[in-house]
Each structure stands twice: as C-alpha cells, then as structure tokens.
Image (cartoon, rainbow, N blue to C red):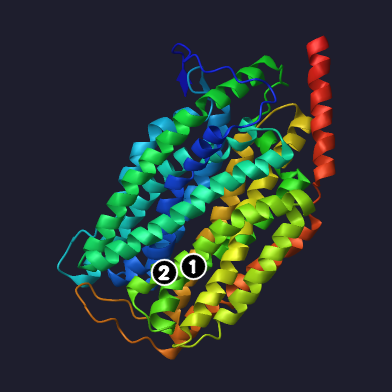
Amino acid sequence: MNDSAADGHPQKVQEGQKLDLKTKLAYGAGDLGPAITANISIFFLLIFFTNVAGIPAGLAGSVLMIGKIWDAVNDPLVGVLTDKTKSRRWGRRLPWMLYGAIPFGIFFFLQWIVPRFSSDQSTNVWALFWYYVAIGLISQVFYTVVNLPYTALTPELTQDYDERTSLNSFRFAFSIGGSILSLILAQVVFLRVSGEQQQYLVLAAICTVISVLSLYWCIFGVRDRVLAFEAKRIQVEESASIPFFEQLKIVFSNRPFLFVIGIYLFSWLGVQITASIIPFFVIYCMSLKNSDVPTVMVAVQGTALLMLFVWTALSKRIGKKPVYFLGMILWIIAASLLFFLQPGQIVLMYVMAIMAGVGVSTAYLVPWSMIPDVIELDELQTGQRREGIFYGFMVLLQKFGLAFGLFLVGNALQASGFQETVPGQTILPVQPESALLAIRIAVGPLPTICLICGLVLTYFYPITREMHAQIMLQLQERQQKRNID
C-alpha cells in the first residue's frame, strides 16, 4: 500500500515528549469498535446460531472455528504488509484502518441476518451454515485489517516502559467500556424490541455505526504522533531487509516473545470460553431470562474497567508480573465456584462475576504491555523494528487456540445432547442433565486450567523493568553512534 500524496503537515512532536490526554483518548478509541463487535460476537453469536438461526451447536461451533482459523492465518500476512506499507500522508498502519473501517462495519452487520434458503429444514440449516462461514471469513479479514495495525501502534506512540502501561490502560478502558456499552445496548434492545431476530439486527446496526465512527476518531487523533515517529524511523539507517521465513525464525527464537504469546493465549482462552458459555449458563443453569445475560456480563466488565486503572498504578510499584498473579488468583477462585452455583443463588452469582472481573482486567492489561518490550529486544538483536509481524503472530496463535476452544465448546454441547431451538419456536427446549453438566464444566474447570497455565508462564517471563532499561540504553547508544558516523 503506497501513498505518494503530499504531506499532511502534522504538528511538530518533540522527541521524548510525553503523550497528552487527547492522544491517549484517541488511541483508546481505536479499540472501542473492535471491542464492541467482538464482545457482541463472543457473548451472543453462538447462542444466536442455536436459538435464532436454528443451527445445531456442533455446526455453530464449527462456523466460529473456521472464522477464527482464517482470521489467524491472515494476521501475520497483514502484519508483514503493514510493516512494508509506505505512506507519507498516513504512515505504515493508519491507511489500513482508514480504508478498512466501513467494510469492517458492513460485514459485521451481515452476520446477524437470517436468510431463508429453503422450506426444508435440513437443507436450510446447511445453506445457513455456508452463508455464515462465507460472511464470517470476509468479516474476519476486515477485522484484521483495522485491528492488527491498531495494536501495532503502541510502540510507535511511546518508547517509555511505564507510559506504555498507561497507554494500554486507556486502550483497555475503551475496550472494556465498549464491552459494557454493548451489553447495556443489548439490555435496552432486548427489553424494547420484540422478536429475537429483530433484537439482534437492531443491536448489530447500532454497534456498527459506533464502531466505524470510533475508528476514525483514532485515525485522526493519533496521526501527528505516528507521523513524527515514522519520520524518525525513516532517518535511522536499518539493517538489510530480512526474508520472510528468516523473520519467522527470528521471531520464534525470541524467548520472551514465546512466553508472552503463551500468557496471552491461555488468558484469552479463559476469557473467550467463559464469555461464549455464560449466556447458556445464565439461561439454562441459573434459570434466568435472555435479558439477564447482559446484566451479568456488565458486572464482570464494569469491575474490570474500574480495576484497570488500579492495576496500572499498582504495576508501577510492584511490576507487571505480581499484578497478573493477583488478578488471576481471584479469577481462578471465582471460576471454580461458578461450577457449583445453583438456581436461586443469584446474589452469589454476581459476587463471582465481580471477582472474575478483577482478574479479567489483568488479562487485558498485562500481556499487551509486555509485547512492546519484546519488540525492542528484537530491534536490539536485528537492527529492525518489526511490530507488525510480532503482533501478527501473537494474534495468530491466540486465534488458533480460540478456534479450537470454540469448536470444543460447540461440539461438547452437541455431544452432551444440547437441544437447539427450531426457528419460530417461542419456548426454549428443556436441556438434559448431560448438557447442563457440559455447560458447568465449560464455565468453571475449563477456564481454571487455562488460567493456571498462564500463571506458570508468567512466573518464568524474563523481561523486568531493569532489563528493559538496559535494552533502551543500548538502543540509544547505537543511534547516537550512527548519528556521529
């Protein structure tokens, strides 16, 4: 992607200048759109497929798995392409967000339509399956086009160890805030709009508009800072370009990077499995209504939002690893207790949701504040800044894991005898005890195992604040030597 148009004459940004509030807010807004759409998809798409579109749980899980695998495959490709993008007007990352925002919104909306292909139920189910697979594949492409370049902006906006944690706190404040907003919107729409299919269409339309607008806020709000970094990067003489497969070898020989992607993979397996199964848990295990699902999730995400800034301040005092440990331990306790909850124990359910939210905020904050440190270590070792390929492969492996997790949940439900809703059916089917047990396992023990694995990897993660300071010092010395030469 090339752009040879005239420069946009951005404001001068002095080297080492701290990020102002306006830039932090604009950067945070970039995660609002992807967070809203991803949140609605995580919480409601599986149950939408089974209870509105009438697709069996196993097929529904397969739709999500195929989309996630494809999403994972295109991540490193987009990452490498953004590293190679040259645009004097927009830099390396912003053109992708600029041109991808509207298609991203359109194809998200199309996932929530239930077309009628045939009067024969079996034929219609398979036609719907392939429709959602096709729309899902295209939707995931545009999600990557806007989201991956966005995530790679962090090390371009600031090179300060602690300011990155602060910047990520703004990002995830918008991310969690978007999740809460989407759940509040879901609650309002579910109460005011009649008919489940219409409810999801109205909700998707509102979320689409908000998502696209927030992406443009980010693009124009961080542009000056991004172009200032880009001008500095171009002036620095880099090593010769490294072939793609050699880049892969370097990336996966970066030991701290392997720890980070492992930590992120297990953290988000816990998040995504829990999020996708919670609607089933609330409706079938706790005997509540569909409109109660957003309230439960707001308790989780609202707590996560409030704790985000607490954890950010605490990480400056005790470090990222202890913060992660504290949050995960609380979440593990909550996930373990959810397995034993019974209908009627509503207050206890909300207590567990709040405890889980305390831990969820560290899953948002800590892994993403680690990855820029890994990128600087790579720059020290290779002489190149390759944010795109690192973020791309981090997300690739995460999504492969998530694809397997969603496939596992969907097929476990089907194998346990879960009964999907036939289109037009107004009363939910009674689920067998085997299906209720499968839901409980997915909401409790399964996330607990993932979180424990993440804790083990975090314990051995090698980059400390002191080690990062040494990396930055060596990079500055190298740059000063180049300037003298």
User: Circle 2: is it few (<14), some (14-19), or many (20+) Cα within 10 Å?
Assistant: some
Relative height, residue 352 to residue 198 (above, below): below
- At label 1, counting other C-alpha atoms closer than 10 Å, the crowd grade (few under 14, some 14-19, many 20 or more) is many
- The amino acid on which the numbered mark 2 sits, given as a three-letter code, is Thr
Task: Look at the numbered discs 2 and 1 and tell me whether their residues touch, using CB distance below 8 Å.
Answer: yes
Kind of residue sitting beneath label 1:
Ala
The residue carrying mark 2 is 295
Q: Position of residue 147 (x, y in %)?
A: 49, 42
**Residue 112 visible to an observer of this rendering:** no
Reading the image, the residue beneath label 1 is 299
Nearest the viewer among 434 and 361 is 361
- Residue 159 higher or lower than 270, as above or below: above
Residues 329 and 70: in front is 329
Q: Looking at the rendering, which quadrant does residue 314 occupy?
A: bottom right
Q: Secondary structure at mark 1?
A: helix
Q: Position of residue 98 (x, y in %)?
A: 41, 31
Camera-side residue of 386 and 180: 180
Residue appearing at x 66%, y 45% in the figure: 165
Residue 192 figure quarter: bottom left
Instruction: Give percent across and percent down for residue 133.
Output: 36, 55
